[in-house]
Amino acid sequence: MESRKIKSTKQNPSLLGFGCMRFPTIDGEIDKKEAKRMMDYAYSKGVNYFDTAYPYHGGKSEIVVRDIISNFDRETFYLADKLPLWDCKVEEDIDRIFHEQLEKCGVDYFDFYLIHAVNKQRLTQMEEMKVIEKLEKYKKEGKIHRIGFSFHDDLEAFKLWVDLYEWDFVQIQLNYMDVEHQQGIEGYNILTKKGIPVIVMEPVKGGGLVKFNDKIEALFLDRDKEVSIASWAFRWVGSLTNVKVILSGMSTMEQVEDNLNTFNNFIPLNESDKDLIKVVRQEILSLSKVDCTSCNYCMPCPHGVNIPGNFRLFNSYAMYENVGHTSWAYGDLVKASMSANFCVDCGECLPKCPQQIEIPTELRNMIEYFEENGIIK
């Protein structure tokens, strides 16, 4: 397993990190047996970095993680968790949530602890609640080993956060399609110049860089028929030398096996490979409709709209033009009262979207596009 030592520490995390936000589910609940099988297998093959958070799977991800890692030697893996500032109404909530997380995960300390999904608006809250001071206290007590933040905003806000504190690490969204989105590649370069280790989330853009139409897939397959389309996205991120961990929210054993194949035989991209990625990027940009990663932060919609589900269909049809599947899937959303036409433009979703998507507008665009292409009769 490819691993990258974090400078001036003994920490040597696997380059592939197991993201615990997209565990397999049955009837809306985590499939604990399958999740355990997947994590156990990944761990046995060298994955030693596990990433969870307070809101994942409705607060149940941490509990499932606890049940799985209880069988691992605590000194052989790294556990990351996150503080949800939006759930902290008073200072006391920070202490309450933090210690609840330790208990839910069944550990005495977190190797990596992040302030979750920060943006410009949360800077004031950070200062008023003295969040850094509290996290430093936990660090001195041995309950946190490294302090960082995960980011969802623009480059201007990113620079403010980076300069706020001497961070041990920072987690950013980055993939070959998002080089100019949020903090983009410039944010990565800023962290690298400052010597701050980088953890990357959304390397395959919520599954968006896993499968394409025949024209785009042919670009990859003509170069190498033996590797998956997804592996190219992981290798692009892994070719950035200051990236220490690449998180993958794996939902199936097939994804685990494919990722292990990529990272146990990791090959950085050469210049020719990078040129190929540039061509693919331009092809995708000409097709994709909405920059949604299916993070689900916009959910639940008060009017029942499955926002990520609608956008997945929107982008999927634009890229693959699968009329039958799209008509069937959209019909299911209509029957469940979750389709785009149930949006009333209340705007409640707008401040929750890390990608800053104009959600009601894009849902209307989707309806018009589907009507034009015969998906909606």
Image (cartoon, helix red, strand yellow):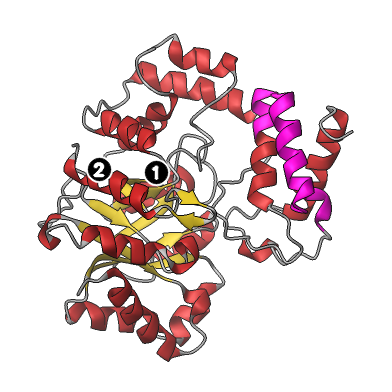
Q: Where is residue 324 in the image (x, y as percent from the top left)?
A: 73, 25
Q: Which of 147 and 374 is in front in this view?
A: 374
Examine the image and state in which quarter residue 284 appears.
top right
Name the amino acid type tagged 2.
Answer: Ala
Q: Position of residue 193 (x, y in %)?
A: 30, 50
Which residue extends farthest top? Answer: 222
| Magenta segment includes 332 | yes
Name the residue: 63% across, 60% down. 298
Q: Mark 1 points at which residue?
A: 250
Dots 1 and 2: beta carbons under 8 Å? Answer: yes
Q: Which of 60 and 183 is in front in this view?
A: 60
| Magenta segment includes 156 | no
Circle 1 SS class: loop
Name the residue: 80% across, 65% down. 346
Q: What stretch is highlighted in magenta?
A: 316-343
Circle 2 SS class: helix
